[in-house]
Image (cartoon, rainbow, N blue to C red):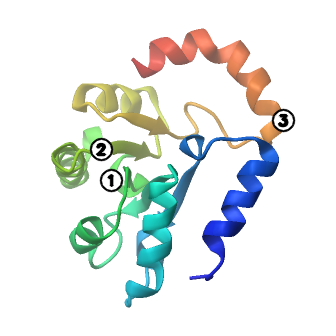
Amino acid sequence: MQPNIVESLDAVLQLAAVPAEKVTLEITESRLPEDISKVMSSLTRLRLKGFEMSIDDFGTGFSSMEQLRRFPFTKLKIDQAFVTGAADKPAARAILESSIDLARRLNIRSVAEGIETEEDLSLRRRLGVDLAQGYYLSKPMPQLDVEAWMQTHNANLESDLS
């Protein structure tokens, strides 16, 4: 909603020498404004610059489908309530499967939040979720630790995420 958000983000990326395509902006579904005209221009400009855009906590808001139609999202992050333990929860699994199918049909990538166990990861593989996120893969860490973590876990990640 900040009028200068596009210019501010552009300046930060130039200073850090990072291409916009390497940055995903997460927009929480429940925080999207009622009056989309206030943000649509900025979001469209950010997409044109190459930023990725993810709708976060998908399925927890009141107007999920309408938001997907209106905003230029590139990723759909499925809320952990529908991912964690979905193998044993028929209703959660149905929502998870429907969300994955919806992402495919909209030609955007699906992200499963809340991968907490090997079973969650296996189900994600079987259902064809594009990306996975959760404590089973890694707990949050400072930026400076990511590169070292990736080097030590790269081989494991390759096999876990394929």
Instruction: Pinpoint residue 125: horizontal percent, then vertical percent.
Output: 31, 26
Q: Is residue 32 left or right of residue 16?
A: left
Callout 1 secondary element:
helix
Contact flag, marks 2 and 1 (Cβ < 8 Å):
yes
Q: Is residue 70 visible?
A: yes
Q: Which residue is mark 3?
A: 144
For the N terminus, give its image quadrant. bottom right
Q: Is residue 62 above or below residue 114?
A: below
Measure the alpha-carbon separation of dots 3 and 1.
31 Å
Instruction: Pinpoint residue 3: horizontal percent, then vertical percent.
Output: 61, 82
Q: Is residue 85 visible?
A: no
Q: Is residue 130 left or right of residue 3?
A: left
Can you tell which of label 3 and label 2 is closer to the viewer?
A: 3
Instruction: Pinpoint residue 38: horizontal percent, then vertical percent.
Output: 46, 86
Amino acid marked by disc 1: Phe
Instruction: Pinpoint residue 108: horizontal percent, then vertical percent.
Output: 30, 46
Q: Which residue is mark 2?
A: 86
The numbered dot on residue 82 is 1
- Give the quadrant of residue 118: top left
The numbered dot on residue 140 is none
Callout 3 secondary element:
helix
Contact flag, marks 3 and 2 (Cβ < 8 Å):
no
